[in-house]
Amino acid sequence: MPKYKVILDREKCIGNASCVAVAPRFWELQDDGKVMLIDSKLNDETNKWELIIETEEDLFENQEAENVCPVNAIKIEKLEY
């Protein structure tokens, strides 16, 4: 399976936490009222949080999170090698 990058723009996040409801292995609500992508790393160039995923199950869960986000703060990109 190809690898994918899950990208979170925390500045857009409004704390709806719908992503937490559909993919709790990857998303959690933080004390500041916004969600965090668990085990992600901050990309200093884009100021967005990123996580590489490699399984179909992980992709499916994060696609659900992307689909339910009301402010489009979550994006998934296929990585080309």
Image (spheres, helix red, strand yellow):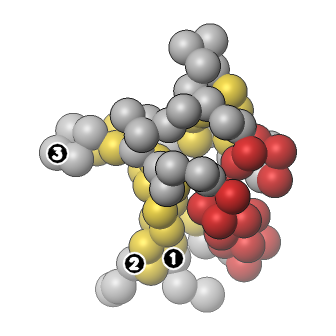
Q: Quadrant of residue 32?
A: top right
Q: Position of residue 43 (x, y in %)?
A: 28, 44
Badge 2 marks a residue whose secondary structure is: loop
Between disc 1 and disc 3, whose residue precedes? Answer: 1
Q: In the shown orientation, is residue 72 left or right of residue 45? A: right
- Tell me whether the residue at label 1 lies in contact with that at label 2, contact meaning CB atoms closer than 8 angstroms: yes
Disc on res. 79: 2
Q: Quadrant of residue 7?
A: bottom left
Q: Which residue is located at x 72 percent, y 78 percent? A: 56
Disc on res. 3: 1
Q: Which residue is located at x 53 percent, y 85 percent? A: 2
Badge 1 marks a residue whose secondary structure is: loop
Q: Position of residue 57 (x, y in %)?
A: 78, 72
Q: Which residue is located at x 69 percent, y 58 percent? A: 68
Vertical order, 45 against 30 (above or below): below
Vertical order, 64 against 7 (above or below): below
